[in-house]
Amino acid sequence: MKLNYRIIIFALAIVFGIVFSVPSLLQTEGGKKITLGLDLQGGLHMLLGVKTQEALKSRIKSIAASVKHYADRNDILIDGLTFDESSVRFEVLDSDEIKAFDEFLSKIEGAKVEKNGSVISISFTPKEIEKIKKLAITQAIETIRNRLDQFGLSEPIVARQGEEKILVELAGIKTPQEEQRARELISRAAKLELMAVDEDRNARVYNMSDADAASYGDVILPDAKNPKIKYLVHEIPILDGGMLTNANVGFDQNNRPVINFKLNSEGAEIFGDFTGANVGKRLAIVLDGKVFSAPNINERIGGGAGQISGNYTVLEAKDLAIALRSGALLAPIYLMEKRSVGPSLGADSIKASMIALIGGFVLVIAFMVVYYRMAGVVANIALIANLLLLLAVMSLFGATLTLPGMAGIVLTVGMAVDANVIITERIRELIYEGKSMHKAIEDGYSNAMTAILDANITTLIASVVLYVYGTGAIKGFAITMSIGILASMLTAILGTHGIYQMLESKMSKSKNYRFWFGIKG
């Protein structure tokens, strides 16, 4: 027997497979574990809808706030600043200053500006409206994924479904409390706004209707701690959460949890200008349409830092900080479908899948030994190494194993054996033709290589496409198939070739070809 580079690489691959797959299979504390998907360990499946029209309204409202700040900062007198779901309107009192707005208006992406004398109207082109709605979906997916990652869940699945739907799968959610917390974190808009209290009319807020408030350009908002307390605030905010850069849990002087937030440079500038010009008045800190605090402005506040206080537990404050850090949802989401998968169902799925996997594996091994004798044993060694490598790579990179993923493993077993069947049949044909053992092995691998590469590469391409464009269960299938194919290229081709080269002299002396390859002669 002689060692060669093929057998050395194969041996190292087996060692690698054992080191990283065994701790995962035994679920020991040491080493990484394979994460089980929703269908195997239970969890929560949700289908969410997105109210994209609200994203357009939010963008319009943000432009109205920018118009007000630009006019105040440049001492331009404007009147009648209003907005609806599709446009912002205002009048420039000094017609000579209309041109001063041109530079500002030119920077609004996708804006359609109409001027009627001194009255300016800002809306969006149909193309920009469609872009805003698509962005709302994309941003919602990224925001939800970021929140769940910080929530601590392993491998949450968040993917687009259709035009305006989002699929969310959370494996490992087992209790109603965990489910409720996850749902609240996902659905929380986390829309932060700093709004000026209308001090001139706030005393009469309890005698006002929403229509009355709207006539003054105001809106009535409830207090977050006590909904009976109401505030009259200017509808156009000073700034919004889009200028937020960070949010963390802290504690006030009474050791109660609060959320400290930080604004970007633009937000800090607007915040500083407003507080400097409104000393003695109140600024309402509004989150998701509720006033969390309305402190008096005692002096100009620079640096762009603020604080949100409330009757939070530490866990509630932590979740709120996560929601703020990950960004506000551009459009509200709503639950369209919810399905819980219990751990017992997951355990049944694992049991059934393991029976299928082990049963198929044993049948394949038995067939190879009976039909191909020692060549079958060599193929089985490669097959076992292939499974160890597959599990090791999944464990090493923290891949999620799903029920379709286990089906992918079963299919990988078949494909790995198929490569060895093709190689062995080519070797048997050459032996029938009277070739020497060395010539039969080398030419057998050479002749079989084209068919094996074609089959494996095309299947690998299909698996990559499934992973890129698929969701949930399809991704799980694609992952195991891709890893299994790459592993089989190493074990079924390189590994078995190395074993045959190592045993070649012994096989040549034996002359018992039936024993080695299951053929007569």
Image (spheres, grey):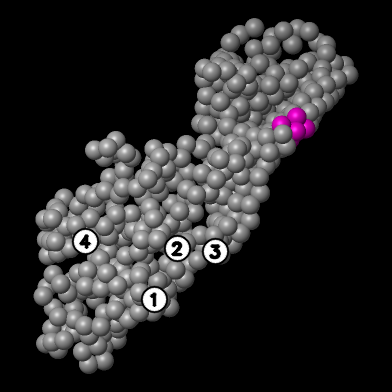
Mark pair 3, 1: CA separation: 34 Å
Proximity of marks 3 and 1: CB atoms separated by less than 8 Å: no
Dominant SS of magenta comes to helix
Q: Nearer the viewer, residue 369 or 304?
A: 304
In the image, residue 98 lies at what x, y percent? 17, 84
Q: Earlier in the sequence, mark 4 or mark 1?
A: 1
Proximity of marks 3 and 4: CB atoms separated by less than 8 Å: no
Question: Where is 211 relative to 182, above or below?
Answer: below
Report the amino acid beneath label 2.
Answer: Ala
Residue at position x 69%, y 13% from top? 504
In the image, residue 518 lies at what x, y percent? 84, 19
Kindly identify which residue carries mark 3. Answer: 164
Q: Earlier in the sequence, mark 2 or mark 1?
A: 1
Q: Earlier in the sequence, mark 3 or mark 2?
A: 3
Q: Earlier in the sequence, mark 3 or mark 1?
A: 3
Tell me the number on the disc at residue 455: none
Question: How many numbered tags mark residues here?
Answer: 4
Residue at position x 68%, y 11% from top? 503
Task: Judge from the rendering whether residue 413 lies leftward or rightward of residue 398; answer left or right.
Answer: right
Secondary structure category for the residue under label 2: loop
Q: Earlier in the sequence, mark 2 or mark 4?
A: 4
Task: Judge from the rendering whether residue 490 lies leftward or rightward of residue 348; answer left or right.
Answer: left
Q: Nearer the viewer, residue 331 or 380?
A: 331
Residue at position x 81%, y 19% from top? 369
Report the amino acid beneath label 4.
Answer: Arg
Tell me the number on the disc at residue 209: 1
* Foreground: disc 2 or disc 4: 4
Mark pair 3, 2: CA separation: 11 Å
Kindly identify which residue carries mark 2. Answer: 331
Kindly identify which residue carries mark 4. Answer: 282
Secondary structure category for the residue under label 4: loop
